[in-house]
Amino acid sequence: MSQEIYAAEPEATRREASEAESSRASRGWWDRNADEYQSDHGAFLGDDRFVWGPEGLDEAEAGLLGPGASLRGLDVLEIGAGAAQCSRWLAAQGARPVALDLSHRQLQHALRIGDEVPLVEADAGVLPFRDGSFDLACSAYGAVPFVADPVQVFREVHRVLRPGGRWVFSVTHPVRWAFPDEPGPEGLSVAASYFDRTPYVEQDERGDAVYVEHHRTLGDRVRDVVAGGFRLVDLVEPEWPAWNHQEWGGWSPLRGNLIPGTAIFVCERD
């Protein structure tokens, strides 16, 4: 669900939203909210840290991009890169990352932090790269939750990866869609059907979507991964660590110690 408040206080509803409407809403929302997002969460994300989600699971510890493998010399695509914090960490490990995002304003923040990583403004469903351009692809809460057709994104990722390439992405854990998006006790009671796939939409007074997020069950996500041409290697559900006392939207120590907040899918291309 949305983690920020749109200034015009749009109406929140559940309704269908096409791929085009979802893409348009995501571009506009992130352009409008990039400054506030980076101001609120930039310190936690760091300038060159690879964090998989609000729990604070760090790639430096998790090693999900490859079991014990060195990243040095690998071509890596980060999708939904935001201010390219993860890509900057990858570059520090000796990788050759490219940071892609739909939002122009988010990429401006990437330039504000540094210019060492190539930036590409594009839609994840139509990647502007040749077949077999990358060894790895990753996305920390980027793109996947906001697209109406995740299989199209996965097929594009499959296309631009070399054989054996790994695709790792994190999303809001599907079970959280059954609970209110609140960090306190009110967020611990089931309020909706887990099986209701109707998108969450914030719309303006004209009925135009200004924010869209799409729900998939855990099983849906697995089937989407397979339909995209990948083999699921691991599914990681980070536990909330004792050191993390922050609240981030609906994420909090209270909820994080009781229900999963993030799901990380580790996939490989044949």
Image: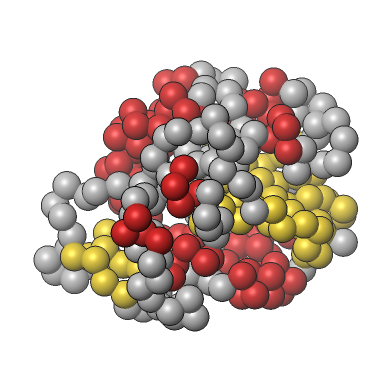
The residue drawn where x is 69% and y is 75% is 223
Q: Nearer the viewer, residue 108 or 192?
A: 192
**Residue pictured at 70% horizontal, 47% vertical:** 137
Q: Is residue 73 above or below residue 7?
A: above
Residue at the (42%, 28%) spot, across then down:
42
Q: Estimate the x, y position of residue 235 in percent, counting from the top left.
A: 72, 58
Closer to the camera, 216 or 117?
216
Determine whether, in the image, residue 135 is placed left or right of residue 252.
right
* Colour convention: secondary structure
Q: Quadrant of the C terminus?
A: bottom right
Can you tell which quarter of the image residue 51 is in?
top right
Question: Where residue 100 sits in the image (x, y, percent)?
Answer: 55, 42
Residue 81 rendering spot, x and y as whole percentages: 53, 40
Q: Is residue 56 visible?
A: yes
How many discs appear? 0
Q: Which residue shows up at 39% across the image and 40% down it?
A: 247
Image quadrant for the N terminus?
bottom left
Residue 201 against residue 141 in the figure, above or below: below
Q: Quadrant of residue 78?
A: top right
Q: Position of residue 57 (x, y in %)?
A: 62, 38
Above or below, 28 against 155 in this view is above
82 is higher (above) or lower (below) than 224: above
> Visible in this render: residue 171?
no
Pick the residue in front: 186 or 125. 186
